[in-house]
Amino acid sequence: QSRMVEGCIPRRLWDYGLVYESKVLSRISRGHSECPGLEELTGNTIDISEWLDFSFYELVWYWDKPKPTNDRDAKLLGRWLGVAHQVGSSLCYWVLTESGKVFACATVQHVTNDELRTPDTIAQVQKFTTDINQRLQADDHANTEPTNPAVRFLDQDDYWPEHQHFPMPDGD
């Protein structure tokens, strides 16, 4: 819960976070065993890479068209919510859109640190955050700090293992 509050993540998205946490924790070795719990249970070697490609609630670019282009206006800002199993192709992810809807998308890309320093992207992030907080009625977790939203996302390398991903409940 502290990770969700510190990340200023609206309560309505916490179910994604809880499922993600459980998926990641079952796939990493902890304690005295050198084997992840899921591997001990199934006997299969576990691939955790799809769960670690993005951080939960990380800003991402996504394309909602079948054939994405490199056109700057074609990419849209969103928040990564987890791995979308049993939907579409492999490496399909749940993305939160500016309208507050969640959909499965296979064309997702990191927002780079350089992009987060540009005035245009900073303005997009501020608008996105305000819109999401209003749409999800997230007054109790509205992101009021820092004044420059890029600052919060500059040190991506510092996030593991403290900052992890969280996917949508999908029944697998």
Image (cartoon, rainbow, N blue to C red):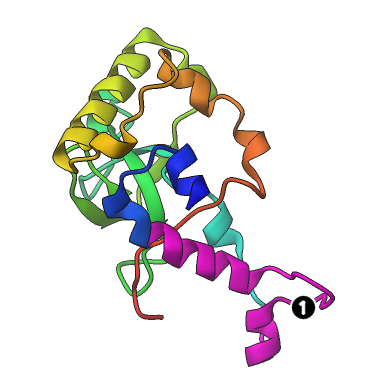
Q: Nearer the viewer, residue 168 or 64?
A: 168
> In the structure shown, which secondary structural element does the residue marked by tag 1 occupy?
loop
Q: Is residue 81 left or right of residue 156?
A: left
In the rendered view, would you say 34 is above or below 130?
A: below
Q: Is residue 160 above or below residue 34?
A: above
* Placement of the C terminus among the 4 image quadrants: bottom left
At a point 53% along the width and 59% down the height, the residue shown is 51
Where residue 91 appears, x then y in whole percent? Answer: 44, 60
Specify the segment rendered in magenta: 16-45
Q: Which residue is mark 1?
A: 35
Position of residue 35 relative to residue 132, above or below, is: below
Residue 149 as seen in the image, left or right of residue 72: right
**Residue at (67, 80) in percent of width and height:** 37
Q: Residues within 10 Å of mark 1 (few under 14, many from 20)?
A: some
Quadrant of residue 57 in the image?
A: top left
Q: Is-magenta flag for residue 93?
A: no
Q: From this viewpoint, is residue 163 visible?
A: yes
> What secondary structure do most residues of the magenta stretch adopt?
helix
Question: Residue pushed farthest bottom?
Answer: 42
- Disc 1 residue type? Cys
User: Which one is nearer the viewer's eye here, 118 or 57?
Assistant: 57
Residue 50 rendering spot, x and y as whole percentages = 53, 60
Q: Residue 30 location in percent, x, y?
A: 75, 69
User: Does 32 appear in magenta?
Assistant: yes
Q: Residue at x 38, y 71 (%)?
A: 85
